């Protein structure tokens, strides 16, 4: 379960900065999973919302859908604050179970949002 303190920290940081957060997600059993896709998702989230910061995740949460090059547990996370360069993180959580990959992804995304707000 996600520790509320991380989510609260993100919301507090957004409030202090006076900006809204937009999120885009695509953790499937396969599909377009790459750094470029995650970055494009953050761009779109900002372009089509009133948010000042965005986060996007795209990955292979499982079960199945992985390949040798893009295994189950691979997740690309991007965060972008308007007017600043985007941030990206590639995570390889492994085939630890769909719920566990999603949980780990949320925690990593919250950390990246905090970095984008600094």
Image (spheres, rainbow, N blue to C red):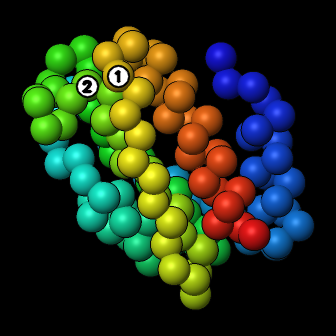
Q: Residues within 10 Å of mark 1 (few under 14, many from 20)?
A: some
Which residue is label 2 attached to? 72
- In the foreground, 89 or 8: 89
Locate the C terminus by quadrant.
bottom right
Q: Would residue 25 be found to the left or right of residue 114 on screen? A: left
Q: Gap in Å between the C-alphas at discs 2 and 1?
A: 6 Å
Vertical relation: 58 (above or below) 39 = above
Q: Residue at x 38, y 12 (%)?
A: 97
Q: Would residue 71 be found to the left or right of residue 54 on screen? A: left
Residue 114 pos. (x, y %): 71, 57
Residue 10 pos. (x, y %): 76, 51
- In the foreground, 20 or 80: 80
Asked whether disc 2 touches disc 1, contact meaning CB atoms under 8 Å apart, the reply is yes
**Residue 27 appears in the figure:** no
Q: Residue at x 33, y 27 (%)?
A: 73
Secondary structure beneath dot 2 equals loop
Q: Would residue 2 be found to the left or right of residue 17 on screen? A: left
**Residue 10 appears in the figure:** yes
Vertical relation: 22 (above or below) 7 = below
Q: Residue at x 44, y 65 (%)?
A: 42
Locate the N terminus by quadrant.
top right
Total numbered labels: 2
* Mark 2 or mark 1, earlier in chain: 2
Residue 5 pos. (x, y %): 83, 34
Q: Residues within 10 Å of mark 2 (few under 14, many from 20)?
A: many
Q: Residue at x 15, y 25 (%)?
A: 65
Residue 62 pos. (x, y %): 27, 20
Which residue is label 1 attached to? 94
């Amino acid at each position: 379960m996600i520790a509320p303190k991380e989510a609260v920290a993100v919301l507090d940081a957004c409030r202090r900065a006076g900006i809204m957060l937009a999120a885009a997600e695509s953790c499937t059993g396969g599909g377009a999973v790459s750094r470029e896709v995650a970055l494009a998702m953050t761009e779109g989230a900002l372009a089509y919302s009133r948010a000042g910061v965005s986060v996007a995740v795209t990955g292979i949460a499982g079960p199945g859908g992985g390949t040798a090059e893009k295994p189950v547990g691979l997740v690309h996370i991007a965060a972008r604050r308007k007017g600043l360069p985007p941030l990206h993180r590639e995570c390889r959580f492994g085939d630890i179970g769909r719920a566990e990959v999603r949980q780990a992804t949320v925690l990593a995304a919250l950390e990246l949002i905090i970095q984008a707000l600094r």
